[in-house]
């Protein structure tokens, strides 16, 4: 089918482009004028169009003649104003939904996040019946949930919409996600052990598994108006994985343990300070309730619904994924070339 991919120059968006091309789709990639197109230019047959989610005219031109939309573009930073998050993650999604439907696209796959239902407490083996929380940990979580609601509400005859929730997406070509950040901190000797002595279990999602799920979702009639968790087959011990990754790359794993009470006191103080608009809008906090929750609260997801609705199963396991990531980083010139970009 003819598909439009937003965020196509980004990490997951680029892998969605790859998966669509491999599946035989004709791909139109929406990029901003300033976007890095180096990977897209290596993918045969991809049509690159310039546009912006805030510019409806450019979206209408990009959506003309497409049958399905993969919407992966989002504001994922851990700083910024409410208006910035709302404009990019919610208003732009609503605009793209309207344009896609008006242009005749029959399917709309939204890349959401488990952050939409994140509570800051342990969530083990949860499924899609888990409700949205009454209070969100940050603006990213709040606006992803609002955008997801808009996508699911737009489902109707002739316009099938769904939301996919991959967590902790990782793999090659990730320059800004959790893996390069953690590797950079370990390389610099600045990654403390925040676990408080607790074993933390998590579902993660390799980029190829997330992209594969996106392609499958466009081919199913069982997804309309529904959200789905997407994850790797393995349940990951977060701090054991950090130790394994540190060993692979010859850096020291986190060893300087910060007691949980001190950790939580530091987070509270930082969040209080980050109420200052200049800091909140322009600088990422060194710690936050959200970032600490990702590293200290167990979060695992049941992907039965995705398997039953569109046949999802992972196409790559964690061990092979780590091997591929290590090989890719070595091809770049090593860890410093990766973390210092």
Image: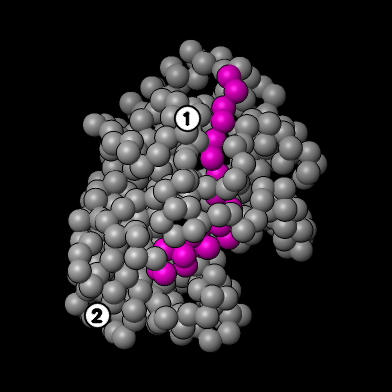
In this picture, residue 32 sits left or right of residue 91: right
Asked which quadrant contains residue 288, the reply is: top left
The quadrant the N terminus occupies is bottom left
276 is higher (above) or lower (below) than 181: above
Q: Residue at x 47, y 30 (%)?
A: 124
Q: Is residue 77 visible?
A: no
Whole-number angstrom distance, CA of label 1 to CA of label 2:
40 Å
**Circle number at residue 124:** 1
Q: Is residue 213 visible?
A: yes
**Circle number at residue 104:** 2
Local SS, label 2: loop
Q: Residues within 10 Å of mark 2 (few under 14, many from 20)?
A: some
Local SS, label 1: strand
299 is higher (above) or lower (below) than 266: below
Task: Check if residue 50 falls in the magenta segment.
Answer: no
In this picture, residue 82 sits left or right of residue 77: left
22 is higher (above) or lower (below) than 61: above
In this picture, residue 15 sits left or right of residue 59: right
The total number of labels drawn is 2
């Amino acid at each position: 089918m003819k598909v439009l991919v937003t965020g196509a120059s980004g990490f997951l968006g680029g892998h969605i482009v790859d998966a669509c091309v491999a599946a035989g789709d004709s791909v139109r990639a929406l990029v901003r004028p300033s976007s890095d197109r180096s990977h897209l230019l290596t993918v045969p047959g991809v049509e690159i169009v310039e546009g912006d989610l805030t510019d409806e005219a450019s979206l209408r031109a990009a959506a003309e003649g497409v049958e399905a939309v993969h919407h992966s573009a989002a504001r994922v930073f851990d700083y910024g104003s409410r208006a910035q998050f709302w404009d990019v993650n919610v208003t732009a999604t609503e605009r793209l939904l309207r344009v896609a439907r008006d242009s005749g696209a029959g399917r709309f796959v939204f890349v959401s996040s488990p952050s939409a239902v994140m509570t800051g407490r342990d969530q083990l083996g949860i499924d899609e019946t888990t409700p949205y929380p009454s209070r969100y940990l940050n603006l990213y979580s709040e606006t992803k949930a609002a955008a997801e609601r808009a996508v699911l509400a737009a489902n109707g005859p002739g316009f099938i919409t769904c939301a996919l929730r991959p967590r902790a997406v990782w793999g090659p070509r990730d320059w800004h996600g959790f893996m390069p950040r953690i590797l950079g901190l370990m390389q610099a000797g600045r990654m403390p052990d925040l676990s408080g002595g607790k074993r933390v279990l998590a579902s993660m999602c390799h980029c190829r598994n997330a992209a594969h799920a996106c392609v499958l979702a466009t081919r199913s009639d069982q997804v309309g108006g529904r959200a789905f968790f997407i994850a790797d087959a393995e349940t990951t011990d977060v701090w054991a994985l950090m130790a394994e990754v540190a060993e692979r790359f010859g850096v020291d794993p986190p060893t300087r343990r910060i007691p949980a009470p001190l950790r939580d006191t530091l987070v509270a103080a930082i969040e209080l300070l980050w109420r200052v608009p200049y800091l909140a809008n322009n600088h990422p906090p060194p710690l936050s309730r959200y970032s600490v929750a990702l590293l200290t609260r167990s979060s695992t997801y049941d992907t039965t619904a995705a398997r039953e609705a569109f046949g999802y199963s992972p196409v790559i396991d964690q061990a092979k994924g780590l091997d591929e990531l290590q090989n890719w980083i070595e091809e770049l010139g090593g860890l410093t070339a990766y973390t210092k970009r």
